[in-house]
Amino acid sequence: METVLLVGGGGREHAIARALSAADDCALYACASNRNPGIAESADGFASVGERDADGVVEYAASVDADLAVVGPEAALEAGVADELDDAGVYTFGPHAAEARIETDKAYQREFMADHDVPGTPEFETFDSADAAAEYVDSVDGDVAVKPAGLTGGKGVRVTGDQVTRAEAADYVRESDHDEWVIEERLVGEEFTVQAFVANGEMRTTPAVQDHKRAYEGDEGPNTGGMGSYTDTELTLPFMDEGDYDDAVAVLEAVVDALPDYKGVLYGQFMLTAEGPKVVEFNARFGDPEAMNTLPVLETQFLDVLTAARDGDPLPDLAFSGEATVCKYAVPAGYPTDPEAGARIEVDVDGGDGALLFYASVDERDDGLYTTTSRSFAVVGLGDSIAAAEERAEAALSGVGDGFRVRHDIGTERLVRSRVDHVAELRGE
Ligand code: AMP
Ligand code: GLY
């Protein structure tokens, strides 16, 4: 029997909890700042501990006698939760704060890529004053992405020629509270994610996922943590070919080669441009929502990945069910600019029939579930095509009441077709 501690309380962690509790020989405990009912239900125990409270997490791990830990959120990695758990003798599938900088410090991330000749690195400049960064944005030719170097929950980036003008981007930088900035070339194309399990210098990759960051249908509105995502029945997505997937894997391999102590999930966010995949960013953990696409189709026990990583054994080859998945988030009204927290969640989501329900940032109180200011819950449809999976996700969402917003266009044939046409146009086909 393995006793595993899961850190984090979002949809991603509910998906991890579901995957771990599928193993017969796993006793699962979880801790997070919010009580996620989906996680609490699959776990043998739950404690309310802040994700950045490394001492609190270590104390809870000791109290349940954990053998292994999995860290979901980047904030916990940045706070050194994996370092402290490892120091306390609990093998943690998640990188130490030094390796997690690949996500938590975008200036480091780009400089690391340049230093190690990681393929797919865009043109970039780093700045340690907002004024200098803003001046550069004003003076540079062409469109740019402006990025605060630190963590912003996916909401800090502005892209000129897409969301804002260059003058607006320069003002945004100048008026911000951030000092450290990355300004880089605007990449044009279609985004996709590849997540890899990494330990002991080895990695295993999972199917490509496409997330939808923009808040509103038709890719309008501000960026969010991700409104939903889909995978196809194979490793690639309909707008990619196998060579594109292999190029993305080569990028992840270059990172793993340069970070031999890295362990956990390495997440590559790519833009498939006319010149092939370029790196938008790396994350040091599963994506949220992407974990909800990936883990339900993983037939290999996730627990076996963790124990192999800990024991220094070769990581198991991964088997996938071959189903397509479509994940759609229900978010509180007003999200992300003016979200309404504290609204009572009264929804009748049908998690049966080829669909799964994952709770995210809901708060479970004595008298029911309440929204927080973050994404509330997600449904994932599974099927033998993206269209079939999308239909199932929508059927499961039919009982969602007022007070929530969903991007119903995610995974629809129309949207997927527009992605394929976009890449064909970029490639001059
Ligand atoms: P990040 O926080 O780096 O993932 O950025 C959030 C989102 O901003 C990405 O998912 C992209 O949609 C967009 N983005 C980031 N960097 C670039 C870039 N260099 N060119 C175009 N879009 C970008
Ligand atoms: N879905 C994007 C992220 O997890 O950062």
Image: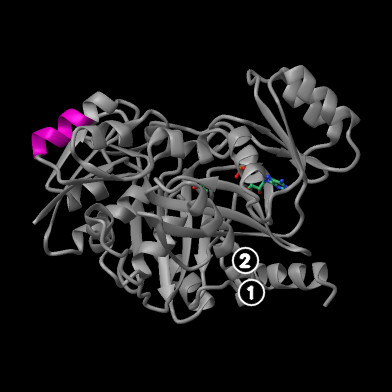
Using the numbered discs, state the Cα–Cα distance from disc 2 to disc 1 in whole angstroms.
6 Å
Extreme residue toward the bottom, this view: 384
Q: Is residue 273 above or below residue 283?
A: below
Which residue is under mark 2? 247
Q: Mark 2 near mark 1, Cβ–Cβ under 8 Å? A: yes
Label 2 amino acid?
Answer: Asp
Residue 189 vs residue 102, the one in the foreground: 102
Relative image position of residue 141 (x, y in whole percent) = 91, 39
Label 1 amino acid?
Answer: Gly
* Residue 347 in sight in this render: no
Would you say residue 63 sits in the magenta stretch?
A: yes
Q: Is residue 141 left or right of 407 when viewed as pictured?
A: right
User: Does dot 2 land on a helix, a strand or a loop?
Assistant: helix
Q: Quadrant of residue 303?
A: bottom left
Q: Is residue 67 above or below residue 32?
A: below
Would you say residue 194 sits in the magenta stretch?
A: no
Which residue is under mark 1? 243
Q: Is residue 225 left or right of 399 when viewed as pictured?
A: right
Q: Quadrant of the C terminus?
A: bottom right
Q: Residues within 10 Å of mark 1 (few under 14, many from 20)?
A: few
Relative image position of residue 269 (x, y in whole percent) = 58, 53
Q: Residue at x 80, y 71 (%)?
A: 427
Relative image position of residue 230 (x, y in whole percent) = 52, 65
Q: Is residue 87 left or right of 227 when viewed as pictured?
A: left
Q: Quadrant of residue 184?
A: top right
